[in-house]
C-alpha cells in the first residue's frame, strides 16, 4: 500500500489537500508517478454533480501522464521508467463482446471510470489524476510516444481521443471538409487532428481573437459568430461537424452547412436535454451523433498518430494550488487551450 | 391543355370536388392517367398547415401510380401504356451537384414537391395525385415493375423509399439486426424491406393486435409496449433503428437497445422539436438521423427491389368519396396498413 498526495473536492468545489491510499501493485497492475494531469470540463461537471449525484470527496482528473514506478509480474506491455498515460477508464469486465472488440467504454457490465465510480478492486470509489500517484490495470495504461511533451500530451487522453474517434468513425481525411464548432480544449484538438488526417477544416467560433490560432492549428477557413456569408460559403459543403461547445447552442443553422446524409457529432456534453427542430434535420437528412471517448486500442492508435504528427494540446501548465482559479477561468473560456497540472507541485 | 378531375382541400380539410387544368405535354413530359394514389400522413400535416402555412386549395397525394397516356418527343424512358409511378418530387434544377449525384431531394435550388409548392413551369402551385391525371417531367417518373399490384405499389413511392433509403444507407442486410418502432404505413414497409434485405427484424409496437402481422411481414421478434424483458433481450444488440412513429416518443430507452456507434433514424416527422437527454446518447455513442425520401435513381432501385421480392404495401383500397373518413381513421392508427385511393371513383 502506497500513500499518495491528492487534491480532493467537496460539493462546494473547494480544494482540500489530503492523502489517499493507492492499492498494492497486483500481478496485472502498473504503478505510475503522475507528472501531469490535464483539466477537463468533465472534472467540473462531475465535481458539481451537474450530470448526476457524485460521491465526495472526489479526486478528479482523467488526463494522466506519468512514469512507471512498478509493474506486476504478469505485465508485459509496460516497464519501469516508461512514459505512460491513463484516460477516462481504469477497469471493465474484459469478457463481454464490447470489451472483446476493444470498445471498453461500452462494457456491458459498465466500465469503471477513472474517478468517482465504484472500484471493483478496492471496494471504495476510484480516485483520479489530481494526485501524485495511481495504480492501474495494464490494459488501461497506454504508451506515450517519447517525442511528445508530457504536459501537452496529458489532454490527449480525453480531449484527444474524444475528437479523434468520431473523426475516424465518420471518415475525416483527404477530400473531406470537417467543421469544428468552438475552439476550446476539444475544438483545438479536433482542428489539429482533422488537419493532420488530411481534411480541410472550417472552424466556427464566436471569438474573433481566436482566428489566427485556428489557422495555425490547421483551419483553412474560420466563420466568426453568425456571419451569414460564412455560413452560406459552406452551405451543404461540409462532410462532418464536431460540436465541441459545452453549452446548448442552436443546431439548426449547422444542418444547412452539412452535406446531405452527413453527421454532426456532439463531443461537448451540456447537462440536460438536447433539442432541435425536426424539419431542417429531416430535409437535410442530417444526423446528430453522440460519441464516447474511445476504446483502449483506439486510444493507443490516437497516441501513436499524435507521435507521428507531433501533435499535443496547447497547454497552460499550472501548479495544483491554482486549480480553483483555473476552473473559473475555464468556465469563462479563458484558457488557451487546456490547463495541465504540474503534479510536482503537490509533492 | 387537358382537364382533370381532382379533389381539393381547404384549410378545414373538407373535400371539394373541382376540375383543374394540367399543362400541355412538353418535350420531356409524361402524361399519366392516375389509377391509384396512396394516402400519406404528410397529406394531413400539409393540408392542415401543421409543418408550415400551406397554399389552398391544396391537392395532396404523392404516392401516384398510373398509365402513360402521352409522352413528349424527347422522352425515351417511358412510352404510352407503361405502368409508372410519381413520388414526392416533380422537378429540380438538374444542374447542381446534388441533382448530378441523383440526390434531387436536396437540390440546392430547392426541389419542387409534387403538391403545394411553386410550380416552375405553370407559375402556380403544384397539384398532387388525388386527381385523375398528372403531367410530370420524365426524370421524375419511375417504372413500376409489372408484377406489382398498382394499388399496393402506390405507397412505395413515399412510404417505400422513405424506409428503403435509410436501410441501405446504414447497411441493413444479412448479419444485422434492425429495429422498427411503430407498425403503421412506414413501419410495415420497413419490416418487409429490411427482412427482404436479409436483416433480422425486431418490431417495437404498442399494439398487441399487430404481433401476428409483424411476424407475417418478416419480424423475428416483437416487443410490445414497454415490456422490460423485450428491451433487455435486445440491449446493445440492434444495429439500426427506424423510428416510424409520427408523434414524439421518448427516445432514451432505444439508445440502450442500439449497439454502440449505431443510429436511430427518424422517418416519421412529428411537427415541432425533437428532444432527448444527452447522457444516454453520448454514453452509447448513438446517432439520431433524419432521412428525406430518396433521389430518383434510388427510388427506381427500390421499385426494382420490390419487383424482385414481390413487395407491395398492404392497402385498404377506398373510393375518393371516403377520404375524409380515411384521414380520421389514419389519425387513430385504424388502417392496415395504408389507404390507396382508386382514382376511377373520381372520373
Image (tube, coloured by chain):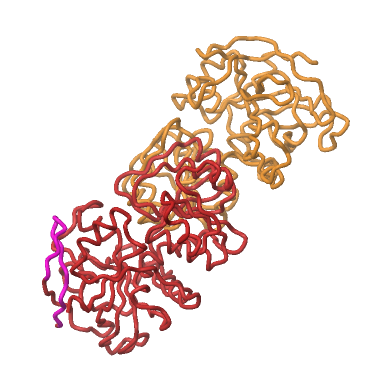
Chain colours: A red, B orange
Image-quadrant location for residue A274: top left
- Residue B125, image x and y in percent? 66, 21
* Observer-nearest of B300 and B92: B92
Which quadrant, please, contains the N terminus of chain B? top right
Q: Is residue B286 visible?
A: no
Image-quadrant location for residue A120: bottom left
Q: Is residue A118 visible?
A: yes
Is A144 above or below relative to B274?
below
Residue beneath the point at 61% across and 32% down: B155
Q: Would residue A187 appear left or right of A38 to someone viewing this image?
A: right
* Observer-nearest of A196 and B191: A196
Magenta highlight range: A2-17
Q: Would residue B162 appear left or right of B119 to someone viewing this image?
A: left
- Residue A115, image x and y in percent? 23, 66
Q: Would residue A127 appear left or right of A246 to someone viewing this image?
A: left
Residue beneath the point at 25% across and 62% down: A326
Task: Identify the main secondary structure in magenta.
Answer: strand
- Residue B268, image x and y in percent? 49, 36
Residue A268, magenta (yes or no)? no
- Count of number-bearing discs: 0
Residue A14, magenta (yes or no)? yes
* Observer-nearest of B248 and A195: A195
- Residue B157, image x and y in percent? 64, 34
Is B174 above or below relative to B265?
below
Residue beneath the point at 85% across and 37% down: B76
Which quadrant, please, contains the C terminus of chain B? top right
* Observer-nearest of B272 and A6: A6
Is B251 above or below relative to A209?
above
Amino acid at each position: 500500500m502506497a500513500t499518495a498526495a491528492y487534491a480532493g473536492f467537496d460539493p462546494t468545489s473547494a480544494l482540500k489537500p489530503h492523502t489517499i491510499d493507492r492499492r498494492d501493485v497486483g500481478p496485472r497492475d502498473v504503478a505510475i508517478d503522475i507528472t501531469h494531469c490535464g483539466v477537463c470540463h468533465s472534472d467540473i461537471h462531475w465535481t458539481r454533480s451537474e450530470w448526476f449525484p457524485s460521491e465526495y470527496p472526489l479526486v478528479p482528473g482523467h488526463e494522466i501522464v506519468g512514469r512507471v514506478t512498478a509493474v506486476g509480474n504478469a505485465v508485459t506491455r509496460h516497464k519501469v521508467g516508461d512514459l505512460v498515460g491513463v484516460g477516462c477508464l481504469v477497469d471493465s469486465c474484459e469478457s463481454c463482446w464490447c470489451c472483446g472488440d476493444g470498445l471498453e467504454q461500452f462494457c456491458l457490465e459498465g466500465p469503471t471510470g477513472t474517478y468517482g465510480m465504484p472500484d471493483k478492486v478496492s471496494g471504495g470509489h476510484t480516485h483520479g489524476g489530481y494526485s501524485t500517484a495511481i495504480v492501474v490495470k495494464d490494459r488501461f495504461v497506454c504508451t506515450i510516444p517519447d517525442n511528445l511533451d508530457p504536459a501537452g500530451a496529458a489532454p490527449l487522453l480525453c480531449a484527444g481521443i474524444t475528437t479523434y474517434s468520431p473523426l475516424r468513425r465518420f471518415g475525416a481525411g483527404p477530400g473531406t471538409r470537417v467543421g469544428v464548432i468552438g475552439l476550446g480544449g476539444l475544438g483545438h484538438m479536433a482542428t489539429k487532428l482533422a488537419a493532420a488526417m488530411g481534411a480541410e477544416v472550417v472552424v466556427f467560433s464566436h471569438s474573433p481573437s481566436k482566428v489566427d490560432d485556428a489557422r495555425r492549428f490547421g483551419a483553412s477557413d474560420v466563420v466568426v459568430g453568425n456571419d451569414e456569408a460564412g455560413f452560406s460559403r459552406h452551405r451543404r459543403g461540409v462532410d462532418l461537424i464536431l460540436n465541441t461547445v459545452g453549452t446548448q447552442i442552436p443546431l439548426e443553422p449547422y444542418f444547412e452547412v452539412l452535406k446531405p446524409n452527413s453527421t454532426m457529432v456532439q463531443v461537448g456534453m451540456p447537462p440536460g436535454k438536447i433539442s432541435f427542430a425536426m424539419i431542417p434535420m429531416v430535409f437535410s437528412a442530417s444526423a446528430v451523433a453522440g460519441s464516447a471517448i474511445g476504446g483502449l486500442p483506439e486510444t493507443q492508435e490516437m497516441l501513436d498518430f499524435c507521435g507521428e504528427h507531433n501533435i499535443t494540446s496547447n497547454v497552460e501548465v499550472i501548479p495544483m494550488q491554482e486549480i480553483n482559479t483555473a476552473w473559473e477561468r475555464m468556465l469563462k473560456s479563458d484558457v488557451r487551450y487546456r490547463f495541465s497540472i504540474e503534479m510536482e507541485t503537490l509533492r
